[in-house]
Amino acid sequence: MNHHPKISIRKWIRHQGSRVGAAALSLSLVFAGGNCDSLNPSFVDLVDGAGTGAFTTLQNAPGHLVVQLVNNAEVDERLVAYLEGQGLNLTNAEKRALRPRFRMRINVTFTNGVTSQFEFVDGSTILIDPRFNVDLFPDLTQNDLDNAVVVCDVAQVEVDPNSDIEVFVPVELLGYELVTVTQGGDVTSRFELRETIPPQFRVLRLDTVDEDGNTVLQANIPVRRAPAPADAPVCGSVIAIEITGVLRVPFLAAVGGDAPSYDRQDPNAVASIGGRYEFIVSVQ
């Protein structure tokens, strides 16, 4: 995997500064009619990191709450090497900065029962096989949205349980099946290509567990590391949804292992496509 430095949530928040504040307030400010009127230091650092006092003109401003996606996931070195072999030109700095591109919906439910939903999109837009026209993937190139600022009072913040968490798989995937061939009395087995999947967003799946909670099929997200809801956050809080893990795809050795490929009859290989991730939800 790429050995870029991890970003702590607090450090990430401080370095966003006024950029996130301006974008969040212009794009994501939801007036829900709260009564809280205090801002905690984490919020002030986020929306006014330069210390400009931009909010001093807001007399008796209502309280706010920040929801922030922190993408600390990495990209597998073998996948990067494959993309470079197809003509993707990356500087060392760009390699270190690569992040899988995620898409998910966040629900913010207020104490009055109203729910607002945001689609968060974050990650590297340059991460795609250059043989494909990036203009054909508008979901890849759309503007990032990794934060929302809402007015108090909030009852719950959670990743929408009725929608999917997706990651962009930046390469074409070749799906093979093992078939038995009889020829001249000889019986042989060989892999035959059955499907070709272009680069696209792929739904991340939870591990399959038995009734005792033991993992029987490892997929993309451990059950105990799925994003948990943040209930009754205090007004002025920063709710950080941090993603760690590695974007990976299989390379089927039986067909040479030179291109992203998998055995369609191997449930473990199929389940692993897209990588493996953990989610940490914290309230600061």
Image (cartoon, rainbow, N blue to C red):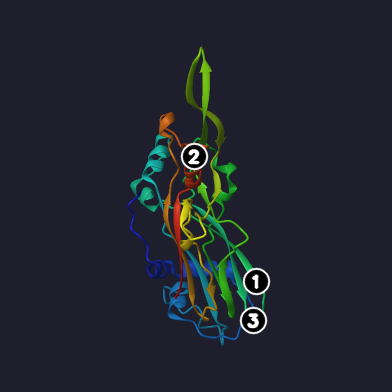
Q: Where is 161 relative to 140, above or below?
A: below
Left or right: 260 in relation to 165: left
- Specify the label residue 115 is tagged with: 1
Q: Which image quadrant: the C terminus?
A: bottom left
Q: Nearer the viewer, residue 39 or 57?
A: 39
Which amino acid, mark 1?
Thr
- How far apart, in angstroms, are the residues tagged by discs 1 and 3? 13 Å
Which amino acid, mark 2?
Asp
Residue 129: image location, x then y, percent = 48, 39
Residue 70 in view: no
Badge 3: residue crowd in 10 Å (few <14, some 14–19, many ≥20): some
First in sequence: mark 2 or mark 3?
Answer: 3
- Specify the label residue 266 is tagged with: 2
Which amino acid, mark 3?
Gly
Residue 56 in view: yes
Q: Residue furthest top?
A: 184
- How far apart, in angstroms, are the residues tagged by discs 1 and 2? 41 Å
First in sequence: mark 1 or mark 3?
Answer: 3
For mark 2, give the secondary structure: loop
Q: Residue at x 46, y 62 (%)?
A: 225
